[in-house]
Every structure is written in C-alpha cells, then in structure tokens.
Image: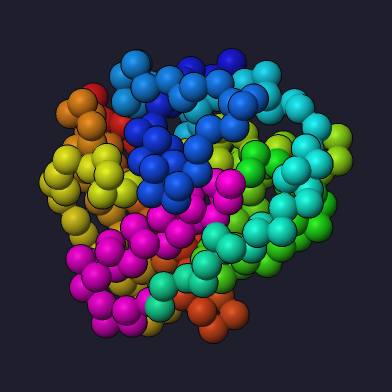
C-alpha cells in the first residue's frame, strides 16, 4: 500500500473553483506532513474506500460537465525563457486540476472520452495515458476519480520558494525544465518537466518529481 501524499493544492483548488465537499466525501487529511512518500514510488496519495463506488447518477447526468474543461494556455514560444516556460507549466497544471475537480467524483464512459480528448491539447499521448490511468479507476458505470488524480502538482498555493530554475533546449521542438522548490513545511522537491511538440502543438511530454531530504 502506498503511503499518503497529502497535498494542500487539493484544498486550495476546492476553494478556487467553488467546489464544496459532497455528502459522501470524507474530509481531506491535512494534519500530516505535506509530502509523505515512499522514495521508490512516483506520486500517489493512495486509495480510499470511495474509489470503488459506482458512478453516481448525478455525475453521469451532470449538464455542466464541460464547464471546467477550459482550453490550454498558449505556449510562449521556442525562444521562451525558463521563467516564461515555468509560468506556462503551472498554468497548464492548474487548468488540469480545475478540470478534474469538475464538481463531480466520477465519470461515465462518454465523459471519459471527453476528458481524454480535452487533455490531448495539454499532454503528449504517453504522459496523458499515464496520468489518466492513475487518476481514473474503472468502476461500475464508468470511472471514479482517485486521489492520484491530484498527484504532486506544483502551484503558487503551496510553493514557498523557487530555489533553482533551469531550461535546457535540445532542439527547436523539445526542452527540459528543471525546478528545485521549497513547498509547505519546508519540504524540498526536485521537479522535471519535458516539453515538446506533438501534432504541431506544444505540450507537456513527461513529468517527474523527487523529494529531497
């Protein structure tokens, strides 16, 4: 079983998007260390009993499903600075979190198709599939959002300081952004984003993070 990875971003996003807790939601645990993770595991808050519940009729028939599936922010260009790319990455991830919260906890098969199509403008095919496979668990009637949907997503709500920022450009359509952060409770995190072009659009191709002792 994975250890808990408790992320204040979830609480911040709930406030930002106006999404309150549903009656069947258990409170988000913010009492533990901000980042608790097995060093061998890449991401993941772990599972809860709610992850196995079937898709609710309310979620399946949510007429406002697409309201938070907002378009990606335009990439600043192949000549962009590390600061500009970092700002773009954070905005992409913020839009992802807002879309996944989406005022519901589960998705029908058709809604999953819409999510996949939406994320194709944000992420390369391989990273999109990897992130969605962790974020959505097949259940009766469709898919349920797991805690892993939120992973560790860098954002201004939890970052205390950016200690190091570097951008390496291997060619005109691929670059690697590395960021050393201090987040809540003085936890150090090393973040790596690979950014490139797929189908003529700039996207996040890969992402990893590592806790620094």
Give the x, y percent position of residue 165: 19, 56
Left or right of 10? Residue 168 is: left
4 falls in the magenta region:
no
- Predominant SS of the magenta segment: helix
Judge by depth and name the residue closer to the eye, 119 or 125. Answer: 119
Which quarter of the rendered picture does the C terminus lie within? top left
Vertical comparison of 94 with 183: above or below: below
Give the x, y percent position of residue 210: 35, 36
Judge by depth and name the residue closer to the eye, 114 or 39. Answer: 114
Residue for point 50% across, 27% down: 45
Residue for point 78% across, 37% down: 56
Vertical comparison of 116 with 211: above or below: below
Where does the magenta region start and end? 75-103
Residue for point 31% across, 19% down: 33
Left or right of 194? Residue 19 is: right
Which quarter of the rendered picture does the N terminus lie within? top right
Give the x, y percent position of residue 112: 74, 54
Residue for point 40% across, 35% down: 11
- Residue 102 visible (yes or no): yes
Vertical comparison of 144 with 130: above or below: above
- Residue 47 visible (yes or no): no
Extreme residue toward the right, this view: 141
90 falls in the magenta region:
yes
Choose top left, top right, bottom left or bottom right for residue 15: top left
Left or right of 60? Residue 100 is: left
Q: How many marks?
A: 0
Give the x, y percent position of residue 190: 28, 42
């Amino acid at each position: 079983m994975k250890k808990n990875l408790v992320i204040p971003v979830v609480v911040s996003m709930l406030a930002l998007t106006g999404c309150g807790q549903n009656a069947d939601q258990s409170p988000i645990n913010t009492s533990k260390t901000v980042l608790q993770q097995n060093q061998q595991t890449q991401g993941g808050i772990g599972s809860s009993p709610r992850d196995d519940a079937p898709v609710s009729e309310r979620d399946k028939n949510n007429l406002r499903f697409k309201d938070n599936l907002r378009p990606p922010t335009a990439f600043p260009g192949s000549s962009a600075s590390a600061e500009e790319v970092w700002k773009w990455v954070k905005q992409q991830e913020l839009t992802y979190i807002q879309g996944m919260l989406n005022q519901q906890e589960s998705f029908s098969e058709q809604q999953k198709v819409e999510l996949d199509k939406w994320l194709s403008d944000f992420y390369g095919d391989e990273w999109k599939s990897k992130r969605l496979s962790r974020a959505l668990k097949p259940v009766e009637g469709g898919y349920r959002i797991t805690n892993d949907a939120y992973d560790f997503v860098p954002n201004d709500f939890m970052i205390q300081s950016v200690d190091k920022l570097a951008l390496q450009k291997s060619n005109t359509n691929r670059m690697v952004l590395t960021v050393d952060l201090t987040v809540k409770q003085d936890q150090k995190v090393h973040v790596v984003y690979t950014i490139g072009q797929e189908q003529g659009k700039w996207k996040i191709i890969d992402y990893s993070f590592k806790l620094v002792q």
